Each structure stands twice: as structure tokens, then as C-alpha cells.
Image (cartoon, grey):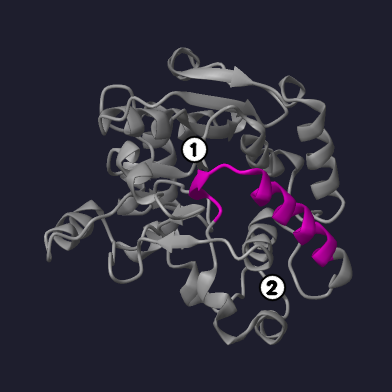
Amino acid sequence: MKRGIYLVANLKSQEMCESLIRSIRDSGCSLPVRLIHFGGEAIRSSYVLSQVELLRYDDFPEEARLFIAELREVLTDCPMGYLYRYLAWFSDWDEFIYSDNDIVALCDWETLFGYLEGYDLVHADEEYRTGGKFNYYKPESVQAIFGEPALESAITAGHIVVKRSVKMVEDITAAVKWFKKHPDIPKKHDQALMHIASLLGHWKMLNLCKPPHSWLSTWAGDYMNPLHIIHRVQIGNAKISHLHYSGRVPRGDKPIDVLLLPGSAGGLSFRAVRRRATSLIQRLIK
């Protein structure tokens, strides 16, 4: 069984990418990491480059590149680099984790593969609580087409564990056709497409944040500071896989941001300290 982690990054996201990889390694996870170049200026961090196999769009087979081009026909609301996460379905790994850069690993991610048995995709998030507002202009239409519970299976595409299969690629292709048929319903980004593919293909999915597992929310916005997380995980032996800073660019002005921007010595990097200080001053003078 071949397994590993896929990331997509460039120089602009280098600091967060380095923080992510350090958190993965500090958790005890030794899985191989493949980093796909997002576009623009490439990552220069010697630490990141020492930990990953660096890949570019052109390193993938023609079939994969044509697939991305097909996705681009309908996914027009996000940069091209966002679509490169889908290249992982054309790799030689049987199972993989895809992660955004604005994430911190809070456990050994290798254990997450143990939950894949019997499932196509495993995730841990509370996207299902949003009512589809981040994925659809008309979430009620998704329910009308796929059934009332359709929005309950929403996925945060920034962190997923996948059992790779040809069928999933076919389902994603079918979702592209669905987007073309119903252009007024979905928002034109990768996460909405993945959810539609899961509905069309009847993917077997496990959300660890739902009962019976009931893992803690992975959204950073649900926590005031690191101490809040420490307290929560001690209640009933709760678990949490990662922390995702989606929805905003962490500036360092919130206590919870300290987990995302550690420096090589375990504290905040100089750039993060300066950004945090600047953000705090700006808040004080408002």
C-alpha cells in the first residue's frame, strides 16, 4: 500500500507551508510528502525542499493535464493552482492526504488512513453546519435535486484523506458536466465541484467530526487560543486531527495564530513576530 501527503505551494505560501511540514514531522508522521508547484515564484526554503519531492504541472501525464484543463472550463472563481490538488488522483499512491498550507497538524496523520477501510474519502470538518452557503448560490436547489440530506455531506476540500480510484475521476468529470448543466447553482470553485462529484458518485465518506467519532472542530475560528484547544481535548478524550485557518489570512493578531507561524526554533519567526506586532498596534489605534 503506497501512501503519502500532497501539498500545493509557491513562494507566497512558503512560510505557512514550512510551518505545516514542521507540524507534520513534529507529530511523528514520516509519510512522504509531494509538493506541487502552485505557479509563480517557486519555494526556496531549504527545509521544505529537504522534506518534499517537488513536482510541477508538467511532471504529470497528459491525461492529468487534460483533466485539469477540463476542470478549468467550469472552475473559474479560483486561481489555476487551486485545481492542482486534483492531480493527486493521477499519482502512483493508492491512498493520499491532500492538505492546504494554512493548516497545522495536531496528530500523526498516518493514523487517519486507518479510518479509510470501507470508505472512499475521510475528512474532519464542520462544513455540514454551513447550510451550503460557501459552495452554492442556491443550496436549496442542491437539496431539491439530490435530496434533503444532500448538504449534510459537505466537504472542506482543504484537508481530505482519499482512497484513489478511477471511478472517483469519472465522478469528478461527471460533476463538470453537471456544473455546465446547472451554472446558476454552484459557486465556481474546487470545493463545490468535489461535493457534487461525491453526490453524483455516491461516495462512501466518513466525517470524523460527526458521531460516533465526534472529533473536535478543525476550524481555527472556533478557538480563542491554544489553551482553549488543550482544555477541549481533555473532555471525554476528544480528538482533533488538524487546525485549519480557512476564511482569512492569519496576520498574527489573534492568539490562536501562534500555532500557524512557528519559527525553526519553536517560537514565532521574525516575520511573524513583526506582523503580529503590527496587527496588534493597528487594532489598538482603531
Q: Secondary structure at mark 1?
A: strand
Q: Is residue 10 visible?
A: no
Q: Which residues are magenta?
A: 157-179
Which quadrant of the figure contains the N terminus?
top left
Side of 113 where 121 appears, left or right: right
Residue 285 picture quarter: bottom left
Q: Residue at x 35, y 51 (%)?
A: 115
Q: Nearer the viewer, mark 1 or mark 2?
A: 1
Up the image or down, 285 lies above or below 274; here it is: below
Residue at image location 67% in from the left, 79% down from the top: 146
Q: In this rendered view, identify the residue nearer to me: 30 or 47.
A: 30
Give the quarter of the image for residue 31: top left
Residue in view at x 87 percent, y 64 percent: 180
When the figure is inspected, residue 199 is found, relative to residue 249, above or below; the finding is below
Q: Amino acid at mark 2?
A: Tyr
Residue 120's tag is none
- Distance from the alpha carbon under mark 1 to that under mark 2: 29 Å
Q: Residue at x 65, y 57 (%)?
A: 194
- Residue 171 lies left or right of residue 13; in this view the side is right
Q: Is residue 72 magenta?
A: no
Instruction: Specify few, some or many for label 1: CA neighbours under 10 Å numbering under 14, 14-19, or 20 or more.
Output: many
Say the numbered circle drawn on residue 136: 2
Rendering coords of residue 123 (x, y %): 44, 55
Badge 2 local density, few (<14 within 10 Å), some, or many (20+)?
some
Q: Which residue is mark 1?
A: 95
Q: Secondary structure at mark 2?
A: loop
Amino acid bearing label 1: Glu
Q: Disc 1 or 2, which lies upstream in sequence? A: 1
